[in-house]
Amino acid sequence: QVQLVESGGGLVQPGGSLRLSCAASGSIFKVNAMAWYRQAPGKLRESVATITSRGNSVYADSVKGRFTISRDNAKNTWYLQMNSLKPEDTAVYYCNGNIFNFYRDYERRTGMDYWGKGTLVTVSS
């Protein structure tokens, strides 16, 4: 089994910054793609940023130029640096990882998706 644990959420003023972390542990051979999603009150969960195993990243239009996703493969950890935060960034942020549990999964490219429980980010003055 695999556990993803987010940290770094909290209350920040508009224009401020936060850095979220997601640490994966458990039965992990290799983490494939890593991602961050968010869900604001009354809205559907949406993709915020994704980073592939090769380090290529994709961002939602709403966060381009303000958020940066990065990863530390040695630690099975990924991050979301959030700058110039806006009230509309307020949401529960979830990390998602596509993970190869064993070498045979890596060979077959059959990764499984895992989710963290979420961390609340509130942007308010």
Image (cartoon, rainbow, N blue to C red):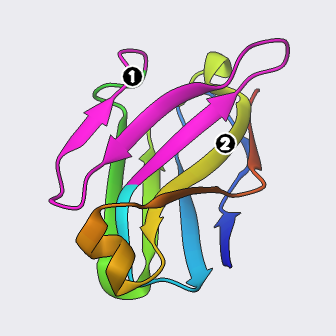
The image shows a total of numbered marks equal to 2
Q: Which mark is residue 60?
A: 1
Residue 93's tag is: 2
Magenta stretch contains residue 44: yes
- Residue located at (42% from left, 85% from top): 75
Q: Nearer the viewer, residue 107 or 20?
A: 107
**Magenta region, residue range:** 34-62
Amino acid bearing label 1: Ala
> With respect to residue 115, does 37 lie above or below?
above
| Residue 99: percent from left, percent from top | 45, 66
Q: Where 7 sits versus 124, above or below?
A: below
Q: Position of residue 112 (x, y in %)?
A: 51, 59
User: Which quadrant of the structure image shows residue 23?
Assistant: bottom right
Q: Amino acid at mark 2?
A: Tyr
The residues bearing labels 2 and 1 have C-alpha atoms spaced at a distance of 14 Å
Q: Residues within 10 Å of mark 2 (few under 14, many from 20)?
A: many
Quadrant (top left/top right/bottom left/bottom right) for the N terminus: bottom right
Q: Where's residue 62, x and y in %?
A: 43, 16
Residue 84 visible in the snapshot:
no
Q: Which residue of the protein is positioned furthest toward the right in this rendering?
A: 42
